Image (spheres, rainbow, N blue to C red):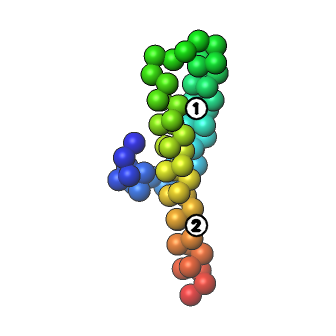
């Protein structure tokens, strides 16, 4: 998912996507602990995707708070 795709999502969709990515990340970690993954970099990419989503959620919360303060 690209940055432009993330910006196009609503706040609820972002939160749902974070939950989905966390579940996916956990599944990848469990699968990797049982038998090595074909591409273990998927774990790293999943972790980065969660960080991107959380960053966008936080940016929107800050924007809402600054609008409400005015």
- Residue 27, position in %: x, y? 61, 25
Above/below status of 68 relative to 52: below
Most foreground residue, 31 or 16: 31
Report whether residue 17 is seen: no
Residue at (47% x, 37% y) in the render: 45
Above/below status of 21 relative to 8: above
| Residue sticking out furthest to the bottom | 70
Most foreground residue, 68 or 59: 59
- Residue 14, position in %: x, y? 52, 50
Q: Which mark is residue 25?
A: 1
Above/below status of 52 relative to 64: above
Report whether residue 1 is seen: yes
Tell me if mark 1 has few (under 14), some (14-19) or many (20+) residues whose alpha carbon lies within 10 angstroms of its own. many
Residue at (63% x, 29% y) in the render: 26
Q: Residue 57 carries which label?
A: none
Image quadrant occupied by the N terminus: top left
- Residue 48, position in %: x, y? 50, 43
- Give the secondary structure at mark 1: helix
- Give the secondary structure at mark 2: helix
Image quadrant occupied by the C terminus: bottom right
Q: Mark 2 points at which residue?
A: 61
Q: Quadrant of residue 30 in the image? A: top right
Q: Say which of marks 2 and 1 sits in front.
A: 1
Count how many numbered circles sit on residues in the image: 2
- Residue 2, position in %: x, y? 36, 46
Tell me if mark 2 has few (under 14), some (14-19) or many (20+) residues whose alpha carbon lies within 10 angstroms of its own. few
Residues at marks 2 and 1, CA–CA distance in whole angstroms: 25 Å
Residue at (57% x, 25% y) in the render: 28
Sequence-wise, which precedes: disc 2 or disc 1?
1
């Amino acid at each position: 998912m690209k940055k432009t795709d993330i910006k196009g999502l609503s706040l609820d969709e972002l939160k749902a996507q974070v939950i989905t990515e966390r579940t996916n990340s956990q599944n990848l970690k469990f699968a990797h602990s049982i038998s090595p993954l074909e591409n273990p970099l998927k774990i790293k990419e999943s972790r980065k995707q969660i960080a991107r989503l959380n960053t966008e959620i936080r940016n929107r919360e800050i924007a809402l708070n600054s609008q409400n303060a005015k």
